[in-house]
Image: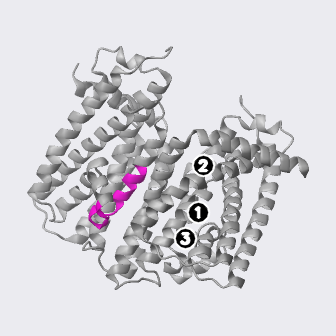
Amino acid sequence: MNPFKLAWTYFRIGVLNELQYRVNFFIQLLQSAIAVATGLIGLSLVFGQVDNLAGWTRSELLAVMGVHILMGGVIRSAIQPNMERLMNDVLNGTLDFALTKPADAQTLVSVREFRFWQLTDVLVGLVILIVAVIQIQSKMGGLQIVAFIAALIMGAIMLYCVWLMVTSIAFWVIRVNEIVNLFEGLYAAGRWPVSIYPDWLRTGMTFLVPVAFAVTVPVEAITNRLTAESMLLAFGLTILFLLLARGVWLLGLRSYSGASA
Amino acid sequence: MRRYIDYYLTSMKVAILSQIQYRVANYFYMIGMITEPVIYLVVWSTIAEQQGGSVGGYTPGTFAAYYIVWTLVRNMNIVFTPFGWEWRIREGMLSAELLRPMHPIHSDIANFAGWKFVVILLWLPLAVFLTWVFKPTFDFSWLEAVVFFIAIWGAYLIRTMLLSLLGMLTFWTTRVSAIFELYFGLELILSGRLVPMTLMPPWVQNLSNHLPFKWTFYFPIEALVGSMTPPELWTGVGMQMLWIVIGASLLNLVWRVAIRQFSAVGG
Protein backbone atom coordinates (compact mmCIF):
# COMPACT_ATOMS: atom_id res chain seq x y z
CA MET A 1 0.00 0.00 0.00
CA ASN A 2 1.52 3.27 -1.11
CA PRO A 3 1.49 5.56 1.96
CA PHE A 4 1.21 8.71 -0.15
CA LYS A 5 -1.79 7.36 -2.01
CA LEU A 6 -3.37 6.47 1.31
CA ALA A 7 -2.73 9.95 2.71
CA TRP A 8 -4.10 11.57 -0.44
CA THR A 9 -7.31 9.53 -0.29
CA TYR A 10 -7.95 10.44 3.35
CA PHE A 11 -7.08 14.06 2.58
CA ARG A 12 -9.75 14.15 -0.15
CA ILE A 13 -12.36 12.60 2.13
CA GLY A 14 -11.51 15.12 4.86
CA VAL A 15 -11.82 18.05 2.46
CA LEU A 16 -15.11 16.83 1.02
CA ASN A 17 -16.52 16.40 4.50
CA GLU A 18 -15.58 19.88 5.60
CA LEU A 19 -16.71 21.56 2.40
CA GLN A 20 -20.26 20.81 3.47
CA TYR A 21 -19.93 23.37 6.26
CA ARG A 22 -18.86 26.51 4.48
CA VAL A 23 -19.91 29.00 7.13
CA ASN A 24 -17.16 27.46 9.26
CA PHE A 25 -14.64 29.12 6.97
CA PHE A 26 -15.84 32.57 7.98
CA ILE A 27 -15.96 31.65 11.65
CA GLN A 28 -12.42 30.32 11.35
CA LEU A 29 -11.35 33.49 9.56
CA LEU A 30 -12.86 35.62 12.33
CA GLN A 31 -11.03 33.58 14.96
CA SER A 32 -7.75 33.90 13.09
CA ALA A 33 -8.32 37.66 12.82
CA ILE A 34 -8.81 37.91 16.57
CA ALA A 35 -5.61 35.93 17.19
CA VAL A 36 -3.68 38.13 14.75
CA ALA A 37 -5.08 41.29 16.34
CA THR A 38 -4.01 40.29 19.86
CA GLY A 39 -0.59 39.27 18.49
CA LEU A 40 -0.17 42.65 16.80
CA ILE A 41 -1.23 44.49 19.96
CA GLY A 42 1.42 42.53 21.87
CA LEU A 43 4.05 43.49 19.31
CA SER A 44 3.08 47.16 19.34
CA LEU A 45 3.26 47.23 23.16
CA VAL A 46 6.79 45.85 22.98
CA PHE A 47 7.90 48.22 20.24
CA GLY A 48 6.29 51.17 21.96
CA GLN A 49 9.14 50.76 24.45
CA VAL A 50 12.12 49.59 22.39
CA ASP A 51 13.11 49.47 18.72
CA ASN A 52 14.53 45.97 18.84
CA LEU A 53 14.09 42.96 21.09
CA ALA A 54 17.39 41.18 21.70
CA GLY A 55 18.52 42.20 18.20
CA TRP A 56 15.25 41.38 16.40
CA THR A 57 13.46 44.24 14.67
CA ARG A 58 9.72 44.68 14.55
CA SER A 59 9.41 43.34 10.99
CA GLU A 60 11.53 40.33 11.84
CA LEU A 61 9.31 39.54 14.80
CA LEU A 62 6.32 39.94 12.50
CA ALA A 63 7.87 37.23 10.34
CA VAL A 64 8.24 35.02 13.43
CA MET A 65 4.57 35.59 14.19
CA GLY A 66 3.62 34.71 10.62
CA VAL A 67 5.51 31.42 10.68
CA HIS A 68 4.14 30.64 14.14
CA ILE A 69 0.55 31.06 12.94
CA LEU A 70 1.26 29.15 9.73
CA MET A 71 2.77 26.22 11.58
CA GLY A 72 -0.06 26.33 14.12
CA GLY A 73 -2.45 25.90 11.19
CA VAL A 74 -0.50 22.87 9.97
CA ILE A 75 -0.63 21.32 13.45
CA ARG A 76 -4.35 21.92 13.89
CA SER A 77 -5.34 20.76 10.42
CA ALA A 78 -3.18 17.69 9.92
CA ILE A 79 -1.35 16.61 13.09
CA GLN A 80 -3.48 17.29 16.17
CA PRO A 81 -6.81 15.84 14.90
CA ASN A 82 -5.13 12.54 14.05
CA MET A 83 -3.36 12.33 17.38
CA GLU A 84 -6.52 13.17 19.31
CA ARG A 85 -8.36 10.43 17.47
CA LEU A 86 -5.52 8.04 18.30
CA MET A 87 -5.76 8.98 21.98
CA ASN A 88 -9.47 8.24 22.01
CA ASP A 89 -8.92 4.99 20.13
CA VAL A 90 -6.42 3.82 22.73
CA LEU A 91 -8.75 4.90 25.52
CA ASN A 92 -11.80 3.16 24.05
CA GLY A 93 -10.03 0.16 22.56
CA THR A 94 -11.22 1.06 19.06
CA LEU A 95 -7.66 1.13 17.71
CA ASP A 96 -8.34 -2.48 16.72
CA PHE A 97 -10.11 -1.19 13.63
CA ALA A 98 -6.96 0.56 12.43
CA LEU A 99 -4.60 -2.25 13.40
CA THR A 100 -6.51 -4.91 11.48
CA LYS A 101 -6.27 -2.96 8.22
CA PRO A 102 -3.56 -4.12 5.79
CA ALA A 103 -1.75 -0.75 5.64
CA ASP A 104 1.09 0.27 7.95
CA ALA A 105 -0.61 1.23 11.21
CA GLN A 106 1.56 4.28 11.96
CA THR A 107 0.88 5.74 8.51
CA LEU A 108 -2.80 5.03 8.86
CA VAL A 109 -3.27 6.65 12.27
CA SER A 110 -1.32 9.68 11.07
CA VAL A 111 -3.45 10.50 8.03
CA ARG A 112 -7.01 9.57 8.96
CA GLU A 113 -8.20 13.06 9.84
CA PHE A 114 -7.87 16.35 8.03
CA ARG A 115 -9.45 19.63 9.12
CA PHE A 116 -9.60 21.65 5.97
CA TRP A 117 -10.83 24.95 7.43
CA GLN A 118 -7.92 25.06 9.86
CA LEU A 119 -5.78 25.76 6.81
CA THR A 120 -7.15 29.30 7.09
CA ASP A 121 -4.35 29.87 9.59
CA VAL A 122 -1.78 28.70 7.07
CA LEU A 123 -3.12 31.29 4.66
CA VAL A 124 -3.25 34.05 7.29
CA GLY A 125 0.26 33.18 8.48
CA LEU A 126 1.53 33.30 4.91
CA VAL A 127 0.01 36.76 4.34
CA ILE A 128 1.64 38.09 7.53
CA LEU A 129 4.93 36.53 6.48
CA ILE A 130 4.80 38.17 3.06
CA VAL A 131 4.03 41.57 4.60
CA ALA A 132 6.97 41.09 6.96
CA VAL A 133 9.34 40.05 4.20
CA ILE A 134 8.41 43.12 2.16
CA GLN A 135 9.11 45.31 5.21
CA ILE A 136 12.44 43.66 5.91
CA GLN A 137 13.60 44.26 2.31
CA SER A 138 16.34 41.72 2.73
CA LYS A 139 17.86 40.36 -0.42
CA MET A 140 16.09 37.07 -0.81
CA GLY A 141 17.60 34.74 -3.33
CA GLY A 142 16.48 31.33 -4.44
CA LEU A 143 18.77 29.74 -1.88
CA GLN A 144 17.03 31.46 1.04
CA ILE A 145 13.60 30.43 -0.18
CA VAL A 146 14.70 26.82 -0.61
CA ALA A 147 16.29 26.84 2.86
CA PHE A 148 13.13 28.38 4.31
CA ILE A 149 10.85 25.74 2.80
CA ALA A 150 13.21 22.93 3.77
CA ALA A 151 13.42 24.21 7.35
CA LEU A 152 9.63 24.52 7.48
CA ILE A 153 9.09 20.94 6.30
CA MET A 154 11.70 19.55 8.69
CA GLY A 155 10.12 21.52 11.53
CA ALA A 156 6.68 20.13 10.73
CA ILE A 157 8.05 16.57 10.64
CA MET A 158 9.73 17.04 14.01
CA LEU A 159 6.53 18.41 15.55
CA TYR A 160 4.63 15.42 14.17
CA CYS A 161 7.19 13.05 15.72
CA VAL A 162 6.89 14.69 19.12
CA TRP A 163 3.10 14.53 18.94
CA LEU A 164 3.25 10.85 18.02
CA MET A 165 5.64 10.07 20.87
CA VAL A 166 3.56 11.99 23.39
CA THR A 167 0.39 10.30 22.16
CA SER A 168 2.07 6.90 22.31
CA ILE A 169 2.50 7.42 26.06
CA ALA A 170 -1.24 6.74 26.12
CA PHE A 171 -0.44 3.04 25.55
CA TRP A 172 0.97 2.96 29.06
CA VAL A 173 -0.90 5.63 31.01
CA ILE A 174 -4.19 5.78 29.04
CA ARG A 175 -5.04 9.43 29.83
CA VAL A 176 -2.80 11.97 28.10
CA ASN A 177 -5.14 14.90 27.35
CA GLU A 178 -3.31 17.06 29.87
CA ILE A 179 0.02 16.45 28.14
CA VAL A 180 -1.54 18.02 25.07
CA ASN A 181 -2.13 21.11 27.16
CA LEU A 182 1.54 21.13 28.09
CA PHE A 183 2.50 20.87 24.43
CA GLU A 184 0.25 23.76 23.50
CA GLY A 185 1.79 25.88 26.23
CA LEU A 186 5.31 25.22 24.96
CA TYR A 187 4.27 25.81 21.37
CA ALA A 188 2.88 29.22 22.37
CA ALA A 189 6.41 30.14 23.48
CA GLY A 190 7.48 29.89 19.83
CA ARG A 191 5.73 33.21 19.18
CA TRP A 192 9.06 34.85 20.11
CA PRO A 193 12.54 33.93 18.84
CA VAL A 194 14.00 31.24 21.11
CA SER A 195 17.20 33.22 21.63
CA ILE A 196 15.46 35.49 24.17
CA TYR A 197 14.65 32.64 26.57
CA PRO A 198 16.81 31.48 29.48
CA ASP A 199 18.96 28.42 28.76
CA TRP A 200 16.81 25.75 30.41
CA LEU A 201 13.72 26.87 28.53
CA ARG A 202 15.57 27.24 25.24
CA THR A 203 16.93 23.71 25.58
CA GLY A 204 13.43 22.40 26.17
CA MET A 205 12.13 24.31 23.18
CA THR A 206 14.91 22.98 20.97
CA PHE A 207 15.12 19.31 21.84
CA LEU A 208 12.00 18.44 23.84
CA VAL A 209 9.38 20.27 21.82
CA PRO A 210 11.30 21.42 18.74
CA VAL A 211 9.51 24.77 18.38
CA ALA A 212 12.91 26.32 17.77
CA PHE A 213 13.31 24.30 14.58
CA ALA A 214 9.70 24.68 13.54
CA VAL A 215 9.48 28.47 13.84
CA THR A 216 12.73 30.25 14.64
CA VAL A 217 14.98 28.39 12.19
CA PRO A 218 12.74 28.99 9.13
CA VAL A 219 12.63 32.69 10.00
CA GLU A 220 16.40 32.71 10.38
CA ALA A 221 16.55 31.42 6.82
CA ILE A 222 14.80 34.49 5.44
CA THR A 223 16.50 37.03 7.72
CA ASN A 224 20.03 35.93 6.78
CA ARG A 225 20.75 34.51 10.22
CA LEU A 226 20.85 30.87 9.29
CA THR A 227 24.14 29.03 9.41
CA ALA A 228 24.93 25.80 7.58
CA GLU A 229 25.51 24.17 10.96
CA SER A 230 21.99 24.74 12.25
CA MET A 231 20.56 23.52 8.95
CA LEU A 232 22.62 20.33 9.25
CA LEU A 233 21.60 19.97 12.89
CA ALA A 234 17.97 20.32 11.87
CA PHE A 235 18.41 17.62 9.26
CA GLY A 236 20.15 15.25 11.68
CA LEU A 237 17.50 15.84 14.35
CA THR A 238 14.68 15.25 11.89
CA ILE A 239 16.10 11.80 11.11
CA LEU A 240 16.65 11.12 14.82
CA PHE A 241 13.11 12.18 15.74
CA LEU A 242 11.65 10.02 12.97
CA LEU A 243 13.53 6.96 14.21
CA LEU A 244 12.69 7.68 17.85
CA ALA A 245 9.01 8.19 17.08
CA ARG A 246 8.90 4.92 15.15
CA GLY A 247 10.60 3.14 18.04
CA VAL A 248 8.29 4.56 20.71
CA TRP A 249 5.24 3.79 18.56
CA LEU A 250 6.26 0.14 18.02
CA LEU A 251 7.13 -0.28 21.69
CA GLY A 252 3.81 1.22 22.74
CA LEU A 253 1.86 -0.91 20.33
CA ARG A 254 3.20 -4.02 22.05
CA SER A 255 1.54 -3.06 25.30
CA TYR A 256 -1.76 -2.24 23.60
CA SER A 257 -4.52 -4.59 24.55
CA GLY A 258 -7.76 -3.87 22.76
CA ALA A 259 -10.86 -3.47 24.87
CA SER A 260 -14.18 -4.97 23.90
CA ALA A 261 -14.22 -3.17 20.60
CA MET B 1 -29.91 29.91 53.89
CA ARG B 2 -28.78 26.92 56.00
CA ARG B 3 -29.65 24.67 53.11
CA TYR B 4 -27.33 26.63 50.81
CA ILE B 5 -24.45 26.61 53.26
CA ASP B 6 -24.82 22.85 53.73
CA TYR B 7 -24.96 22.35 50.01
CA TYR B 8 -21.85 24.45 49.38
CA LEU B 9 -19.78 22.77 52.09
CA THR B 10 -20.71 19.28 50.96
CA SER B 11 -20.11 20.02 47.26
CA MET B 12 -16.76 21.59 48.02
CA LYS B 13 -15.71 18.60 50.08
CA VAL B 14 -16.68 16.22 47.28
CA ALA B 15 -14.79 18.37 44.72
CA ILE B 16 -11.65 18.38 46.87
CA LEU B 17 -11.73 14.63 47.38
CA SER B 18 -12.32 13.84 43.72
CA GLN B 19 -9.79 16.34 42.33
CA ILE B 20 -7.01 15.24 44.66
CA GLN B 21 -7.21 11.84 42.94
CA TYR B 22 -6.26 13.44 39.62
CA ARG B 23 -3.23 15.27 40.96
CA VAL B 24 -0.90 14.18 38.13
CA ALA B 25 -3.40 15.29 35.49
CA ASN B 26 -3.93 18.53 37.42
CA TYR B 27 -0.19 19.05 37.50
CA PHE B 28 0.33 18.67 33.77
CA TYR B 29 -2.45 21.16 33.31
CA MET B 30 -0.81 23.67 35.64
CA ILE B 31 2.66 23.23 34.13
CA GLY B 32 1.22 23.84 30.66
CA MET B 33 -0.34 26.97 32.02
CA ILE B 34 2.83 28.52 33.47
CA THR B 35 4.50 28.80 30.08
CA GLU B 36 2.21 31.73 29.23
CA PRO B 37 3.37 34.03 32.08
CA VAL B 38 6.97 32.84 31.66
CA ILE B 39 6.84 34.05 28.04
CA TYR B 40 5.51 37.49 29.06
CA LEU B 41 8.03 37.66 31.90
CA VAL B 42 11.00 36.85 29.67
CA VAL B 43 9.92 39.33 26.98
CA TRP B 44 9.35 42.18 29.44
CA SER B 45 12.45 41.47 31.52
CA THR B 46 14.47 41.63 28.29
CA ILE B 47 12.90 45.00 27.50
CA ALA B 48 13.51 46.30 31.03
CA GLU B 49 17.17 45.32 30.80
CA GLN B 50 17.53 46.92 27.37
CA GLN B 51 16.02 50.12 28.76
CA GLY B 52 18.66 50.25 31.48
CA GLY B 53 16.94 48.33 34.26
CA SER B 54 13.26 49.25 34.27
CA VAL B 55 10.28 49.92 32.05
CA GLY B 56 7.19 51.78 33.26
CA GLY B 57 8.43 51.43 36.84
CA TYR B 58 8.87 47.67 36.61
CA THR B 59 12.25 46.01 37.02
CA PRO B 60 12.93 42.36 36.07
CA GLY B 61 12.45 41.60 39.78
CA THR B 62 9.02 43.24 40.04
CA PHE B 63 7.96 41.75 36.70
CA ALA B 64 8.90 38.36 38.15
CA ALA B 65 6.78 39.07 41.24
CA TYR B 66 3.87 40.22 39.04
CA TYR B 67 3.89 37.15 36.81
CA ILE B 68 4.48 34.65 39.61
CA VAL B 69 1.45 35.96 41.50
CA TRP B 70 -0.26 35.94 38.09
CA THR B 71 -0.02 32.14 38.04
CA LEU B 72 -2.08 31.84 41.22
CA VAL B 73 -4.59 34.47 40.10
CA ARG B 74 -4.93 32.72 36.74
CA ASN B 75 -5.73 29.47 38.51
CA MET B 76 -8.30 31.23 40.69
CA ASN B 77 -9.84 32.60 37.50
CA ILE B 78 -10.62 29.16 36.13
CA VAL B 79 -14.37 28.74 36.29
CA PHE B 80 -17.02 26.69 34.53
CA THR B 81 -16.26 27.68 30.94
CA PRO B 82 -18.66 29.06 28.34
CA PHE B 83 -17.73 26.00 26.27
CA GLY B 84 -19.12 23.96 29.16
CA TRP B 85 -22.35 25.95 28.99
CA GLU B 86 -22.46 25.44 25.23
CA TRP B 87 -22.11 21.69 25.68
CA ARG B 88 -24.62 21.64 28.51
CA ILE B 89 -27.24 23.50 26.47
CA ARG B 90 -26.56 21.92 23.08
CA GLU B 91 -26.60 18.36 24.41
CA GLY B 92 -29.61 18.93 26.61
CA MET B 93 -27.66 18.10 29.79
CA LEU B 94 -29.23 21.17 31.36
CA SER B 95 -32.52 19.31 31.71
CA ALA B 96 -31.21 17.28 34.63
CA GLU B 97 -29.89 20.40 36.32
CA LEU B 98 -33.26 22.07 35.99
CA LEU B 99 -34.89 19.34 38.03
CA ARG B 100 -32.89 20.32 41.07
CA PRO B 101 -34.46 22.70 43.57
CA MET B 102 -31.75 25.34 43.13
CA HIS B 103 -30.16 27.37 40.35
CA PRO B 104 -27.42 25.37 38.52
CA ILE B 105 -24.94 28.21 39.05
CA HIS B 106 -24.65 27.13 42.71
CA SER B 107 -23.23 23.74 41.83
CA ASP B 108 -20.75 25.37 39.41
CA ILE B 109 -19.54 27.82 42.04
CA ALA B 110 -19.30 25.22 44.80
CA ASN B 111 -17.50 22.59 42.69
CA PHE B 112 -14.89 24.95 41.33
CA ALA B 113 -14.43 26.60 44.72
CA GLY B 114 -13.59 23.20 46.19
CA TRP B 115 -11.18 22.48 43.37
CA LYS B 116 -9.38 25.75 44.17
CA PHE B 117 -8.13 24.33 47.47
CA VAL B 118 -6.43 21.50 45.58
CA VAL B 119 -5.10 23.99 43.04
CA ILE B 120 -3.57 26.23 45.70
CA LEU B 121 -1.92 23.22 47.33
CA LEU B 122 -0.45 22.07 44.02
CA TRP B 123 0.56 25.63 43.13
CA LEU B 124 2.89 26.08 46.12
CA PRO B 125 5.80 23.94 44.80
CA LEU B 126 5.49 25.65 41.41
CA ALA B 127 5.69 29.04 43.09
CA VAL B 128 8.83 27.97 44.95
CA PHE B 129 10.38 26.79 41.68
CA LEU B 130 9.51 30.00 39.82
CA THR B 131 10.80 32.11 42.72
CA TRP B 132 14.07 30.21 42.68
CA VAL B 133 14.47 30.63 38.90
CA PHE B 134 13.34 34.24 38.42
CA LYS B 135 14.28 35.87 41.76
CA PRO B 136 11.31 38.24 42.25
CA THR B 137 11.48 41.27 44.51
CA PHE B 138 8.67 40.91 47.00
CA ASP B 139 7.57 43.37 49.62
CA PHE B 140 4.08 43.26 51.08
CA SER B 141 2.33 44.22 54.28
CA TRP B 142 -0.18 42.18 56.26
CA LEU B 143 -3.01 44.36 54.97
CA GLU B 144 -1.97 43.71 51.37
CA ALA B 145 -1.89 39.98 52.05
CA VAL B 146 -5.38 40.08 53.58
CA VAL B 147 -6.81 42.12 50.70
CA PHE B 148 -5.11 39.77 48.23
CA PHE B 149 -6.76 36.80 49.88
CA ILE B 150 -10.18 38.44 49.60
CA ALA B 151 -9.50 39.72 46.08
CA ILE B 152 -8.66 36.31 44.57
CA TRP B 153 -12.06 35.00 45.67
CA GLY B 154 -13.70 38.20 44.41
CA ALA B 155 -12.00 37.64 41.07
CA TYR B 156 -13.25 34.05 41.05
CA LEU B 157 -16.85 35.18 41.55
CA ILE B 158 -16.69 38.01 38.99
CA ARG B 159 -15.28 35.72 36.34
CA THR B 160 -17.86 33.04 37.16
CA MET B 161 -20.65 35.56 36.55
CA LEU B 162 -19.13 36.92 33.33
CA LEU B 163 -18.33 33.58 31.75
CA SER B 164 -21.70 32.12 32.71
CA LEU B 165 -23.39 35.08 31.02
CA LEU B 166 -21.24 34.51 27.98
CA GLY B 167 -21.99 30.80 27.95
CA MET B 168 -25.71 31.46 28.18
CA LEU B 169 -25.58 33.07 24.74
CA THR B 170 -25.85 29.47 23.57
CA PHE B 171 -29.54 29.62 24.46
CA TRP B 172 -30.02 31.83 21.37
CA THR B 173 -27.35 30.68 18.94
CA THR B 174 -25.14 27.62 18.70
CA ARG B 175 -22.34 29.32 16.76
CA VAL B 176 -20.65 30.82 19.76
CA SER B 177 -16.97 29.89 19.54
CA ALA B 178 -15.97 33.05 17.64
CA ILE B 179 -17.81 35.23 20.19
CA PHE B 180 -15.99 33.44 23.00
CA GLU B 181 -12.64 34.03 21.30
CA LEU B 182 -13.43 37.71 20.88
CA TYR B 183 -14.27 37.94 24.56
CA PHE B 184 -11.05 36.22 25.60
CA GLY B 185 -9.05 38.53 23.33
CA LEU B 186 -10.58 41.62 24.93
CA GLU B 187 -10.08 40.18 28.37
CA LEU B 188 -6.40 39.44 27.64
CA ILE B 189 -5.76 43.09 26.76
CA LEU B 190 -8.01 44.81 29.30
CA SER B 191 -7.46 42.68 32.41
CA GLY B 192 -3.72 42.94 32.99
CA ARG B 193 -3.21 39.32 31.94
CA LEU B 194 -0.91 40.32 29.07
CA VAL B 195 0.98 43.14 30.78
CA PRO B 196 0.43 45.26 33.91
CA MET B 197 -2.22 47.87 33.02
CA THR B 198 0.21 50.75 33.62
CA LEU B 199 2.18 49.67 30.53
CA MET B 200 -0.91 50.14 28.37
CA PRO B 201 -1.61 53.39 26.51
CA PRO B 202 -3.65 55.84 28.67
CA TRP B 203 -6.86 55.40 26.69
CA VAL B 204 -6.77 51.63 27.21
CA GLN B 205 -6.25 52.15 30.94
CA ASN B 206 -9.13 54.57 30.97
CA LEU B 207 -11.38 52.12 29.15
CA SER B 208 -10.45 49.32 31.52
CA ASN B 209 -11.58 51.42 34.49
CA HIS B 210 -15.16 51.17 33.26
CA LEU B 211 -15.06 47.42 32.65
CA PRO B 212 -14.97 44.44 35.01
CA PHE B 213 -11.87 42.73 33.55
CA LYS B 214 -9.11 44.45 35.46
CA TRP B 215 -10.70 43.53 38.79
CA THR B 216 -10.10 39.86 38.00
CA PHE B 217 -6.38 40.05 37.14
CA TYR B 218 -4.63 43.36 37.62
CA PHE B 219 -6.21 44.32 40.92
CA PRO B 220 -5.56 41.09 42.88
CA ILE B 221 -1.96 40.92 41.60
CA GLU B 222 -1.22 44.59 42.26
CA ALA B 223 -2.81 44.36 45.71
CA LEU B 224 -0.01 42.00 46.67
CA VAL B 225 2.99 43.09 44.60
CA GLY B 226 2.24 46.79 44.03
CA SER B 227 2.22 49.63 46.50
CA MET B 228 -1.43 50.64 46.87
CA THR B 229 -2.57 52.74 49.80
CA PRO B 230 -5.11 51.22 52.24
CA PRO B 231 -8.00 53.34 50.81
CA GLU B 232 -7.08 52.18 47.29
CA LEU B 233 -7.03 48.57 48.45
CA TRP B 234 -10.46 48.75 50.05
CA THR B 235 -11.92 50.70 47.12
CA GLY B 236 -10.72 47.85 44.92
CA VAL B 237 -12.50 45.28 47.07
CA GLY B 238 -15.60 47.51 46.90
CA MET B 239 -15.38 47.62 43.10
CA GLN B 240 -15.15 43.84 43.05
CA MET B 241 -18.31 43.62 45.19
CA LEU B 242 -20.04 46.02 42.84
CA TRP B 243 -19.19 43.88 39.79
CA ILE B 244 -20.27 40.71 41.57
CA VAL B 245 -23.64 42.30 42.31
CA ILE B 246 -24.00 43.61 38.74
CA GLY B 247 -22.99 40.23 37.34
CA ALA B 248 -25.35 38.29 39.59
CA SER B 249 -28.30 40.57 38.77
CA LEU B 250 -27.65 40.30 35.04
CA LEU B 251 -27.31 36.55 35.34
CA ASN B 252 -30.62 36.34 37.13
CA LEU B 253 -32.33 38.50 34.54
CA VAL B 254 -30.87 36.70 31.51
CA TRP B 255 -31.57 33.32 33.07
CA ARG B 256 -35.27 34.10 33.42
CA VAL B 257 -35.60 35.12 29.78
CA ALA B 258 -33.30 32.39 28.53
CA ILE B 259 -34.92 29.46 30.23
CA ARG B 260 -38.07 30.05 28.19
CA GLN B 261 -35.93 29.59 25.06
CA PHE B 262 -34.64 26.25 26.19
CA SER B 263 -36.01 23.11 24.64
CA ALA B 264 -34.04 20.02 25.46
CA VAL B 265 -33.19 17.34 22.98
CA GLY B 266 -32.22 14.24 24.89
CA GLY B 267 -30.17 14.67 28.04
Q: Tell me the tag on residue B176.
A: 2
Q: Position of residue A200 (x, y in %)?
A: 31, 59
Can residue A238 be seen? yes
- Rounded to the nearest angstrom, the CA distance separating label 2 from label 1 is 26 Å
Magenta stretch holds residue A237: no
Q: Position of residue A243 (x, y in %)?
A: 21, 34
In the displayed structure, A35 sits above or below B93; it is below
Q: Tell me the tag on residue B192.
A: 3
**Marked residue chain, label 1:** B
Q: In which quarter of the image is residue B186?
A: bottom right
> Magenta residues: mostly which secondary structure?
helix
Q: Position of residue B50 (x, y in %)?
A: 32, 81
Residue type for callout 3: Gly
Instruction: Using the image as rendered, state which of residue B122 and residue B64 is in the foreground.
Output: B122
Q: Which of marks 3 and 1 is in front?
A: 1
Q: Where is residue B18 in the image (x, y as percent from the top left)?
A: 65, 39
Q: Are marks 3 and 2 on the same chain?
A: yes
Q: Mark 1 points at which residue?
A: B73
